[in-house]
Each structure stands twice: as C-alpha cells, then as structure tokens.
Image (cartoon, rainbow, N blue to C red):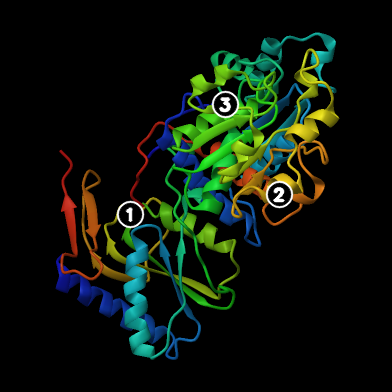
Amino acid sequence: MPWHRKHLLDIESLSADEIVTVLDTARAFKAVGERAIKKVPALRGKTVVNLFVEPSTRTRISFELAEQRLSADIINFSAEASSFKKGETLKDTARNLEALNADFIIIRHSASGAPHFLARVLKGSVINAGDGAHEHPTQALLDAFTIREKKGKIEGLRVTILGDILYSRVARSDIWALTKLGAQVTLCGPSTLVPRVFEQMGCRVTYDLDEAIRDADIINLLRIQHERQRKTMFPSLGEYSSLFGLDQKRLARTKPDALIMHPGPINRGIEIDSEIADCGRSLILEQVTNGLAVRMAVLFLVNGGKGPQEVEG
Amino acid sequence: MNQPAIERALARIAHEIAELDLNGNEVALVGIQRGGVPLAERLRRLLSGIWNQSVPLGTLDVSMHRDDLSRRAAPNVQPTVIPFDVTGKTVVLVDDVLFSGRTVRAALDALNDFGRPTRIQLAVLIDRGHRELPIRADFIGKNVSTSLSEKVHVRLSGAGGSDEVVVEKNP
C-alpha cells in the first residue's frame, strides 16, 4: 500500500496497512545493513535535524546512523548544549531550523504533543522520537518488526507488556501497533502503574504476574521510569523486583518458545534477571539492529512526494 | 507481442549473450525489480541449456537509488539478492521495458555497491524509445515506437501460455 504521510507523529492514527508498509520497507533496509557497503543515496542532499530536547542515547544514535546510511546531512541539537538553556521557546527554535531549510525534524521532547505542534508550524517532515508519556512510534514499529521476523506473524500472538505502563510512551505505542496488527495484548505490573483505564485501548489488564506470562508468546519488559514519576508508586525497587521482576523461576513457567523483549536501557536485577537479558530467548540486541532498519524505512517513506507510486523506467 | 514472439525474442537474446563469452564462466544475470526478474529467470534457463551449466542469477531493487524519490510516493522496495561476487564478472542487467533510462542509471549505481564487474551489459525485452539519459541496451527483444502518452505492459505468466506485450493508449 502506498505511503502518503508527510510526518510520523504517532501510531494511534496509522492504519494496520500503513504499519505493514513500514515493516515491509524496513525488511529491505535491514538487508542494506548486511552488505559490505551499507549506505544508499536515498536522502542525498536532504538535511535532517535531530532535536533531542530530552536526553536520549540509543534512539538518537539509531536515528543518526539511519540518516547517515541514507546519505542525509545532519544537524544535532541537544537540550544540554542548546539555546533552550538560554530561554528560547520550542517555536522559536523550530523557526530557526526552518530558516536553515531543514527537510526533516526528528524530535524527542518531555511534553506530549510537541511533535504535533512542530508539524503544524513547520514546512518539513516531523518524526516523533518520543514525546512525554504519549508515544514512541519508531520503538513500536521496531518491536512489531522484531516480533514478525521471529514469529513469522503478529496476528493471534499473545503479547504481555510488563512493568511501568502508566509513564511509558513505549507501552502506549506498542499497544496501538500490536492490537492494530491483531495481537492480544496483556498488561501487568503494580496496580499504581497499570490502571484499568488502559483496557479502553483494547488490551487486557491483570495484576497476576504468573497468569500474565504463562501463555505469552512475547514478554516485553519495561523499565521503571523514575524520571517521570512524581511520587513513589510502589514501596521499593527490591519489592518491585521480587513481585514483578522476570527471574529464572518465573521464566521456567513460561512457554518454552516465549521470547523476551526490552526497549532499553535495561536495569539488570530489577525488571530483568541479568542472565535472562543475555540468554538465547532475549531479543534485546536484535531490537537495536532492527531499530536502525525501521528508522531508515520511516525516513525513506516520509521523504516520498505526492506523485504516483509506480513509474515506468 | 504474443507468446511465441516473446519466446523467440528471449531465445535470440540468450544466443547473443552466449556469443559474448563462449564458456559462460564469467557471465551473471541480474533482473531489475520487478519486471526484469521473471525475464532474467527465463534467460538463465535458456543460457544454462546453451552452456550446460548453471548461470548465477540475482535480483536488484533500484528504489533507494532513484532520482525522483521526493517527487512521488515512496516505492514498495522489493528484495535485492545478489548471491555471488560481481567482481570480475560480466553482469547482464535484465529489464522488461527500456524507456527514460533512469531505472538503468539507478541500477548501475545500485550494482556498484556490490563490487566492480568487469563489464555491465543491458538486456531488455522492449525498447520503447524516449530516452532522457545517454543509455542504450546491448540486447533488445523488440524496438517499439511509442508516443509519450502510451503505456507498455509486459505480462508474463510464468509457466502458462498467456504471455503478452501490449501498448495501451492513455485516454
């Protein structure tokens, strides 16, 4: 199906077909990453601004490498070393970027909706690299890509997302993407971090960890987002770990082909036992590899123009 | 162009390729996605028969190397699979219709990322003219004069008997 969007702001507004288009395109870009020459000229002459107002390491590096492999020119803009420190507003920063003729703006911001705001005021394409606790669309796309690659499908699979759902943009984007593609999503964690209201997104909420992981095909672990929690949501990390951490004993009760995912950064010994993070059932590093392919695919797709998809050579 | 005419054209192209390099050791075929891929498969079968040995075959998607990417909806990228080293080989690129030449230009760039062939040649079933770049084919099934508003459809069924090439006038 042809892609006609100029921006990637969230998963909520995408159709299942559009998500599949990204995953199919990402497969071709993953193959590029396996060649001796890993660079293609698709974005040659285009300028990409990486506007990371909230700190990020892996997502920023992944986007940067994706842009380099597409031959784009790159400007990096981070909160610590930028004019935000001097009191400039997001809108003024955006206008300055416009004055540089930026074609793409990749934005990470602590405020939900910041990418949508930029998309309204800028001429270029905006890609959301995580906005507050709202969405992290490229993470959900790479998770879906990884699941489809490993399991051959997504429809009908049971996916359990475990941990801090309330403050997680990854959880929200994953729920949208996976339910649209036909997976049955179960959420589990402390009741303070997994409110029942998430059931309205089309998934199941349970506080019984053993039940949540028993039949799961995929177990996606989330980090506790201390930086977003305004008050203490559970008594202690030790208690969280003993009640909801994935350890060997609990892993033994899962299906033998259940696979473990984590968007990173992982906190070994808290949400995941150190050995499990490194075991053959862990997809954590493959998620990183696939993230690069998915971000190349997203940039490639939003770069498309208005003309017809098929042309004669 | 009907089924027998297409078969004759492909057989002639195969023989012309065979005359390049009599033992066939150094020839590889690469079909350009999508129309060139089934043609390259047929040429491989014909050439393998002539040389009594299998001929390396690959597929090449040129989407990432096109020069019109921001002027049209992003193309569906098809697999690129080149399961052999192109360096030192004569690579015959295969496509169904040669028109502006821009696809072939992109294919030359894309192939370049896989190594340095000794030479690259181009085989097409139909040359419909209207080149926008200084590119020509080495092996041509049929020259067809067309107007810019017309469309050329190559339909290959694979094993069945309904192969055809049709020139369609745009309303």
Query: Residue A285 got which mark?
Result: 2
Q: Nearer the viewer, residue A91 or B132?
A: A91
Amino acid, disc 2: Leu
Mark 1 vs mark 3, foreground winner is 3
Query: Where's the N terminus of chain A, which quadrant?
Result: top left
Q: Which residue is painted at 63% across and 52% down in the image?
A: A39
* Chain identifier of the residue bearing label 3 in the image: A
Label ID, residue B99 = 1
Observer-side mark, 2 or 1, equals 2
From the viewer's perspective, is residue A164 above or below residue B13?
above
| Structural distance between the alpha carbons of marks 2 and 3 | 28 Å
Dot 2 or dot 3, earlier in sequence: 3
* Residue A10 visible in rendering: yes
Q: Name the residue type under label 1.
A: Phe
The kind of residue on which mark 3 rests is Val
Q: Say the numbered circle drawn on residue A240.
A: none
User: Which of the 4 image quarters holds residue B50?
Assistant: bottom left
Q: Residue B150, percent across and down?
A: 21, 47
Q: Alpha-carbon neighbours of circle 3 within 10 Å: few (<14), some, or many (≥20)?
A: many
Q: Measure how far apart labels 1 and 3 are at the Cα level.
A: 57 Å
Instruction: Say above or below: B155 vs B48.
Output: above
Q: Are marks 2 and 1 on the same chain?
A: no
Q: Chain of mark 2?
A: A
Asked if the residues shown at circle 1 and circle 3 are in contact, with their CB atoms under 8 angstroms apart, the answer is no
Task: Determine which residue is flagged by label 3.
Answer: A205
Q: Secondary structure at mark 1?
A: loop
Q: CA distance from mark 2 to mark 1?
A: 44 Å
